[in-house]
Image (spheres, rainbow, N blue to C red):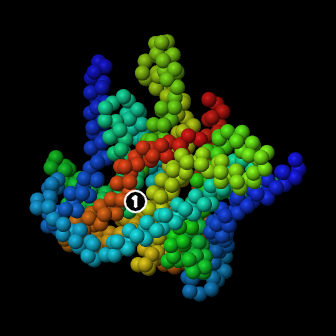
């Protein structure tokens, strides 16, 4: 018995070896050393110089850093709420016994398989101030031309809206699978008791979807917090920093200005923020789970 | 009453389909317009005349075929790498008992919580030091450290019945033999869903290739498009270059869209599997 357990351990480590080699070299090492790196000045050509808290002090004094932090949260919250709500509504629709719902499913999921670069550029074209399809129709209905991506107040919402088109399909399918997993008997029993369709939705559908909603929101949050591609393609972080997120700022520090210490400081902030938020989400989620 | 409700549902469904289809139609129609047709105040749905000039321009001026080949190579490589490291790891976490199991699993969790951007500058320097920038494997590796597929495999293997591997163990099979002969053939649905997701993720990945694939020899499609083609839309270029840009976009999405339409059922099943935890 003891012997079999021991050999079990050895083979387990062999099974884990390939993954953990990659893990330690290409994830754990850079993730841990990014913190000391944030206390240096480093432009890759020279050797790193110790800088104390200089990167952090400068960052916290920079209004653009606070704007990027605000933008990141604004974007993340809008996308998470928008995607979760829209996905649930679409799933409810596609769960009805309608002819052509497969077509609906195909079209809602199709944007998800194209790259963020492709999705971003087609929306950039549709949002175009002079010749884009959206302004073409606004004008036709007598409405004024909107600047969309070239406006500091509209750009962020325009990027969020594009994301609703691009990535809602994934969450819709998850919700659809969850809806189909709710036992039919629950609904039948409630109908026998005289429940109307709103009550069925409120007291059976919504509670049954709770765990999946937690999963979907955590996933949306983690993904949208890292938004970069859309900003890179559609706005380059502008106009005047209005779509610059923390990730975009990190990118600019490192790969446009070659200030790796500064980039590492932003990375560290990203790391701390997302760890805090994830832990909070799980805590809230598990508390709510216990109440039900 | 019941009938009017159905009618409304059909109308909403039609509206949704149209909304989601419009951007695709815009790509298609713009790519067949001449440059002067692109810049009309009133949007034309059907180009008149239909021209292939934009495609000629894109294919003649950019190494499009090379980008596609690079994207295919990196995608295949990263899918194989992901399967190669996560299947055995998922099996170990699902079936074997060993010292430090919880600690190792918590470490794996970190890759899901910690975003790529949080260690990217350091990874870049490390890859540069290891001479892995501008190599196929250097593009594939960052996709393989994420443990999402390990989770999926662990979950999937844990719910398989244990009788068979126990019987095999008594017959003197090693864990390796059990893994290859018994477990692997049963994991097909999970493997399909991991292949689909890793392939989409890899094909569409842009942030890392933008800096790790700067040489034309390894540049992937999203990086090539973003750096060489789409930048024309950033400056106040006149006439607006969207004809060529949409032609390039259509060429870049053709493969994933076709695969999706043919394998639609597997995509849907794959996503559904990831959600059912």
User: Measuring 21% from the left and 68% from the top, which residue is drawn there?
Assistant: B54
Relative to residue B162, is residue A246 drawn left or right? left
User: Measuring 60% from the left and 79% from the top, which residue is drawn there?
Assistant: B130
Nearer to me, A189 or A153: A189
Relative to residue B137, is residue A171 drawn left or right? left
In which quadrant will I find the C terminus of chain A? top right
Q: Residue furthest top?
A: A193
Q: Up-down: is B57 above or below A243?
A: below
Residue A171 in view (yes/no): no
Q: Up-down: is B125 above or below A10?
A: below
Q: Residue furthest left?
A: B49
User: Measuring 49% from the left and 64% from the top, which residue is drawn there?
Assistant: B76
Relative to residue B117, is residue B214 drawn left or right? left
Q: Secondary structure at mark 1?
A: loop
Q: Position of residue B193 (x, y in %)?
A: 51, 49
Q: Position of residue A54 (x, y in %)?
A: 62, 75
Nearer to me, A125 or A270: A125
Q: Residue furthest bottom?
A: A46
Q: Up-down: is A46 above or below B95?
A: below
Q: Position of residue A179 (x, y in %)?
A: 48, 32
- How many discs mark residues in the rendered view? 1
Residue B72 in view (yes/no): yes
User: Measuring 31% from the left and 75% from the top, which residue is drawn there?
Assistant: B62
Q: Residues within 10 Å of mark 1 (few under 14, many from 20)?
A: many
Q: Which residue is mark 1?
A: A115
Q: Which quadrant of the view contains residue A19?
A: bottom right
Q: Up-down: is B202 above or below B150?
A: below
> Which chain is home to disc 1?
A
Q: Which quadrant of the view contains residue B240?
A: bottom left
């Amino acid at each position: 018995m003891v012997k079999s357990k021991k050999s079990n351990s050895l083979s387990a480590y062999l099974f884990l070896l390939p993954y953990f080699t990659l893990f330690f070299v290409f994830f754990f090492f850079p993730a841990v050393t990014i913190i000391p790196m944030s206390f240096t000045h480093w432009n890759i050509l020279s050797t790193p110089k110790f800088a104390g808290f200089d990167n952090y002090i400068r960052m916290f004094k920079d209004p653009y850093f606070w704007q990027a932090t605000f933008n990141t949260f604004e974007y993340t919250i809008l996308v998470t709420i928008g995607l979760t709500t829209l996905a649930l509504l679409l799933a409810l629709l596609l769960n009805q016994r309608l002819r052509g719902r497969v077509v609906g499913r195909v079209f809602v999921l199709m944007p998800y398989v194209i790259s963020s670069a492709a999705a971003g550029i087609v929306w950039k074209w549709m949002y175009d101030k002079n010749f884009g399809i959206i302004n073409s129709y606004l004008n036709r209905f007598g409405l004024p031309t909107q600047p969309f991506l070239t406006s500091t107040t509209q750009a962020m919402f325009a990027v969020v809206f594009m994301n609703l088109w691009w990535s809602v399909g994934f969450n819709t399918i998850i919700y659809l699978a969850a809806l189909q997993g709710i036992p039919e008997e629950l609904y039948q029993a409630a109908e026998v008791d005289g429940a109307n369709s709103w009550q069925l939705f409120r007291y059976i559908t919504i509670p049954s979807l709770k765990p999946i909603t937690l999963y979907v929101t955590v996933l949306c949050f983690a993904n949208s917090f890292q938004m970069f591609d859309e900003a890179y393609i559609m706005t380059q972080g502008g106009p005047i920093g209005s779509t610059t997120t923390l990730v975009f700022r990190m990118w600019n520090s490192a790969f446009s200005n070659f200030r790796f210490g500064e980039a590492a400081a932003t990375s560290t902030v990203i790391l701390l923020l997302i760890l805090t938020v994830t832990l909070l989400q799980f805590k809230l989620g598990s508390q709510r789970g216990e109440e039900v | 009453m019941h009938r009017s409700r159905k009618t409304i549902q059909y109308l909403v469904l039609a509206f949704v389909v149209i909304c989601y289809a419009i951007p695709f139609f815009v790509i298609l129609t713009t790519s067949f317009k001449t440059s002067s047709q692109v810049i009309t105040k009133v949007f034309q749905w059907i180009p008149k005349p239909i021209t292939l000039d934009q495609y000629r321009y894109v294919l003649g001026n950019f190494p499009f075929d090379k980008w596609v080949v690079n994207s295919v190579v990196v995608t295949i490589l990263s899918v194989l790498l992901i399967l190669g490291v996560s299947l055995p790891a998922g099996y170990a976490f699902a079936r074997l008992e060993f010292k430090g199991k919880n600690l190792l699993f918590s470490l794996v969790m970190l890759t899901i919580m910690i975003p790529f951007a949080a260690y990217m500058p350091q990874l870049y320097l490390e890859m540069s030091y290891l001479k892995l920038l501008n190599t196929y494997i250097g593009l594939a590796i960052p996709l393989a450290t994420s443990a999402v597929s390990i989770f999926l495999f662990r979950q999937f293997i844990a719910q398989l019945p244990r009788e068979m591997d126990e019987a095999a163990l008594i017959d003197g099979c090693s864990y390796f033999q059990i893994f290859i002969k018994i477990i692997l053939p049963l994991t097909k649905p999970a493997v399909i869903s991991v292949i689909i997701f890793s392939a989409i993720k890899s094909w569409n990945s842009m942030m890392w290739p933008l800096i790790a694939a700067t040489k034309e020899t390894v540049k992937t499609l999203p990086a090539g498009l973003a750096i060489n083609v789409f930048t024309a839309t950033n400056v106040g270029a006149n006439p607006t270059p969207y004809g060529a840009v949409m032609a390039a976009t259509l060429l870049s999405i053709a493969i994933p869209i076709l695969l999706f339409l043919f394998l639609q059922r597997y995509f849907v099943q794959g996503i559904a599997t990831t959600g059912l935890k």
